[in-house]
Structure formats: structure tokens, C-alpha cells
Amino acid sequence: MAELIKKHCPKCNTEVSEEAYFCANCGTILRAKPTDVSITKQILIYFVSLFLAPFGLGYAYTYLKQPDMKSKIIGAISLGLTILSLVFGYLAVKSFFEQSYNSLLDITNTQGL
């Protein structure tokens, strides 16, 4: 029978298991909860990064600072999609305003204003 390795809470000195994320006695955080790398979470992250571009930066930051490689890859893809979305959004808005400006110039030139 395998026994769990025990350690002590740094705040209240209560014995806690090695796998515990927080102390059951005082609630002190003992270690960070790992990030979710499930396929549904990835789809959500990529959707937000592409269609709600600025919010993708939060996911990118969170996942890039994780120690495991899979989380870092998810963060890098999220950052790339966010940047791509921002660039295309900028180009679309720029094109729209240039076309609108040129249309106004054409109207004023044809009317002799």
C-alpha cells in the first residue's frame, strides 16, 4: 500500500499531503493549480484569441508562463492568433476608411464643390 508523502503547511504547521493545492485547515495556497489543457479549453482560447483579440492576450500570458511545454505551445498559438486578428482588424478598418474617404472625394469632385 503506497502512502502519500506528507508535508506541513508553512502558515499553521498542519500536516498536508504532497498533492494538496491548499491547506484544509487555514486555506493557505501550497502550490499553483495546473492550467487546463483540454481540447474544449483550447477551442475556447483560440476562439477568444481570434474573434475577441485583446482578450486573447490574457490567455497567452497565463499559458506562456506555465512550466510545461503543452501550455507554452497553447499560449504561443493564442498570442499568434491574437496578433493576426489585430493586424487583420487594423487593415480592414484602414481599408474601409480609405474607401470612404475616396468616395467622398469623388462625390465632391463630380459635384464641383
Image: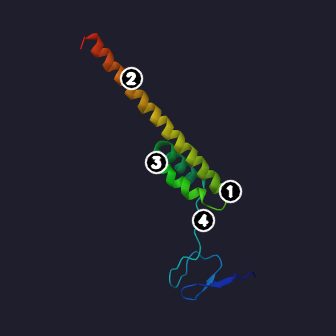
SS of the residue under disc 1 = helix
What residue sits 58% from the left and 74% below the top? 21
Q: List the residue tagged with mark 1.
A: 69
Q: Is residue 74 above or below residue 110?
A: below
Q: How is the image coloured?
A: rainbow
- Looking at marks 1 and 3 on the same chain, the residue that comes earlier in the sequence is marked by 3
Q: Position of residue 109 (x, y in %)?
A: 29, 13
Find the distance from the CA under tag 3 to the CA under tag 2: 26 Å
SS of the residue under disc 4 = loop
Q: Is residue 65 above or below residue 101?
A: below
Q: Position of residue 98 (x, y in %)?
A: 39, 25
- Looking at marks 1 and 4 on the same chain, the residue that comes earlier in the sequence is marked by 4
Q: Nearer the viewer, residue 30 or 79?
A: 79
Question: How many numbered marks are there?
Answer: 4
- Mark toward the viewer: 1 or 4: 1
Q: Position of residue 38 (x, y in %)?
A: 60, 55
Q: Nearer the viewer, residue 100 or 67?
A: 100
Which quadrant: the N terminus? bottom right
Q: Is residue 11 above or below residue 33?
A: below
- Mark toward the viewer: 4 or 2: 2
Q: List the residue tagged with mark 4.
A: 34
Q: Position of residue 110 (x, y in %)?
A: 28, 10
- Looking at marks 1 and 2 on the same chain, the residue that comes earlier in the sequence is marked by 1
Q: List the residue tagged with mark 2.
A: 99
Q: List the residue tagged with mark 3.
A: 54
- Mark toward the viewer: 3 or 2: 2
Residue type beneath disc 3: Pro
Tag 3: Cα neighbours inside 10 Å, few (<14), some, or many (≥20)? Answer: some
What residue sits 32% from the left and 15% below the top? 106
- Looking at marks 4 and 3 on the same chain, the residue that comes earlier in the sequence is marked by 4
Tag 2: Cα neighbours inside 10 Å, few (<14), some, or many (≥20)? Answer: few
Residue type beneath disc 4: Pro
